[in-house]
Image: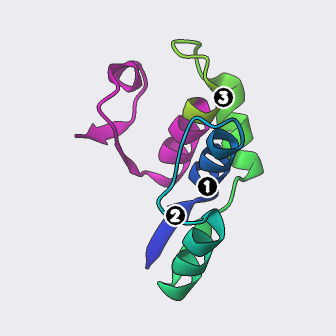
């Protein structure tokens, strides 16, 4: 199964709306490709929010904190080069 975090789509939509990201295609086309390639969206759950509420504040970015919570909640490996993730008990690769 191909799994995509809805959080990443929301984050990208915000960056597009404030002109921090330019795409070579339309955002709508990306959505069509997600559907055409059978990606499933990982929802944000209440359990994720419970984990967020107990995380130490090594990092304050709400999107990153949700990535951390979802990684903990689902035992995911996070792909990132950001070193602040090392402050949390999640698996990362880069």
Q: Which residue is mark 3?
A: 62
Say which element carries label 2: strand
Query: Of residues 19 and 51, which is closer to you in this image?
Result: 19
Please give the name of the residue rendered at 22% of the width and 40% of the height, measured from the top-left corner.
94
Q: Which residue is mark 1?
A: 9
Q: Earlier in the sequence, mark 3 or mark 1?
A: 1
Instruction: Find out whether residue 85 is within the magenta segment.
Output: yes
Q: Which residue is mark 2?
A: 4
Check whether the beta carbons of the residues at disc 3 and disc 1 lie within 8 A of each other.
no
Q: Earlier in the sequence, mark 2 or mark 1?
A: 2
Badge 3 crowding class, 10 Å Cα cut-off, few under 14, some 14 to 19, many 20 or more, is few
82 relative to 71, above or below: above
Q: CA distance from mark 3 to mark 1?
A: 14 Å
Label 3 or label 1, whichever lies nearer to me, is 1
Residue 65 image point, x, y percent? 59, 30
**Magenta extent:** 65-94
Check whether the beta carbons of the residues at disc 2 and disc 1 lie within 8 A of each other.
yes
């Amino acid at each position: 199964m191909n799994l995509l975090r809805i959080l990443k789509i929301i984050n990208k939509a915000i960056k597009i709306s404030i002109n921090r990201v330019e795409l070579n295609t339309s955002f709508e086309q990306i959505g069509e490709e997600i559907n055409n390639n059978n990606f499933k969206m990982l929802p944000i759950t209440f359990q994720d929010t419970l984990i967020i509420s107990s995380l130490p504040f090594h990092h304050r970015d709400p999107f990153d904190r949700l990535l951390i919570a979802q990684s903990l909640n689902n035992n995911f490996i996070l792909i990132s080069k950001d070193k602040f993730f090392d402050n949390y008990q999640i698996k990362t690769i880069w």
